[in-house]
Amino acid sequence: MIKDIKAVIFDVDGTLLDSNGVWQTIDRVFMDERGLDFDEEFQAEIDGMSFHQVADYCHEKYNLEETPDELIVIWHDMAREEYKNNIDAKPGACEFIKHLKKKGIKTAVASSNSYELIEPGLTRNGIYDDIDVFYTAANLEESKDDPKVYLNIARELQVRPEECLVFDDIQPVIKAVNEAGMRSCVVLDQRSIDIYGEDKLKSKADYFIYDFTDIKLEK
């Protein structure tokens, strides 16, 4: 899988960290408190959006009294302690990243989540210092399902697109990665399976895994 690869780009939630359940809980509580419907259609609509885009989307769609900035603060407060204290890496993720660093392969994160949550989550699991480049809600100018995101990361890492492998758990990102001329591996997180269907996710990616223990690490 990593033959001829010089850089690996990772999503975080549902890919590196087993955190999608936390966000489903937060979304459900937030929506229930406001008498709004929480369903798979809502989840599919926000997939790939940055934190700020989701806030703008929810503010406008549901005519919420909170401003987008206030919504972000609310979601941050609900999630911060979970990332710092409770969220674990996906099985095999830490070992895989350490293996990449040993092989001299560059690493990056592309996440629509905020840096303020990603940093404690990755630090808790001992892999924050192994990531070379971070693209998060703070510096994502486009949605995460825009090929430009991945081309910009490749440029910053000083590698060609065809030398990159991207791990993500949602279909729109896999499509963007393919359009960027990179190799893609879908991580079959249960949330994404529920939204898109396992067969559909597999069909769009070059590779698929359920977690990183599925990857055989060559010595």
Image (cartoon, rainbow, N blue to C red):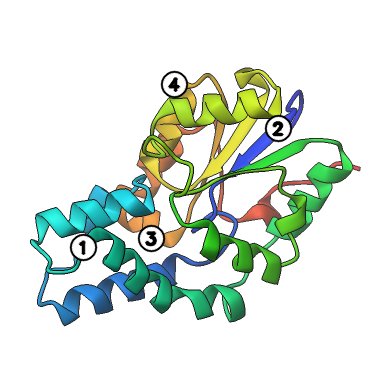
Of pointers 3 and 2, the one earlier in the residue sequence: 2
Of pointers 4 and 1, the one earlier in the residue sequence: 1
> How far apart are the two marked residues, 4 and 1, measured between alpha carbons?
35 Å
Instruction: Please state which of the two labelled residues, at mark 3 or mark 4, is closer to the viewer.
Output: 4
Q: Is residue 67 visible?
A: yes
Query: Relative to 180, does residue 102 appear above or below in the rendering?
Result: below
Instruction: Please state which of the two labelled residues, at mark 2 or mark 1, is closer to the viewer.
Output: 1
Of pointers 4 and 2, the one earlier in the residue sequence: 2
Do the CB atoms of the residues marked 4 and 1 lie less than 8 Å apart? no
Instruction: Point out the image quarter for the C terminus.
Output: top right
Binning the other alpha carbons within 10 Å of mark 2 as few (below 14), some (14 to 19) or many (20 upward) gives many
Using the image as rendered, state which of residue 199 and residue 34 is in the foreground: 34
Residue identified by numbered label 4: 179
Return the mark for residue 7. Answer: 2
Residue identified by numbered label 1: 67
Do the CB atoms of the residues marked 4 and 2 lie less than 8 Å apart? no
Quarter of the view holding residue 79: bottom left
28 with respect to 86 (left or right): left
Do the CB atoms of the residues marked 3 and 2 lie less than 8 Å apart? no
> How far apart are the two marked residues, 3 and 4, measured between alpha carbons?
24 Å
Q: Amino acid at mark 1?
A: Thr
Secondary element under disc 1, as helix, strand or loop, is loop
Of pointers 3 and 1, the one earlier in the residue sequence: 1
Residue extending farthest right: 219
Q: Position of residue 168 (x, y in %)?
A: 51, 45
Of pointers 2 and 1, the one earlier in the residue sequence: 2
Q: Position of residue 87 (x, y in %)?
A: 57, 73
Binning the other alpha carbons within 10 Å of mark 3 as few (below 14), some (14 to 19) or many (20 upward) gives some
> How far apart are the two marked residues, 2 and 1, measured between alpha carbons?
38 Å
Residue identified by numbered label 3: 191
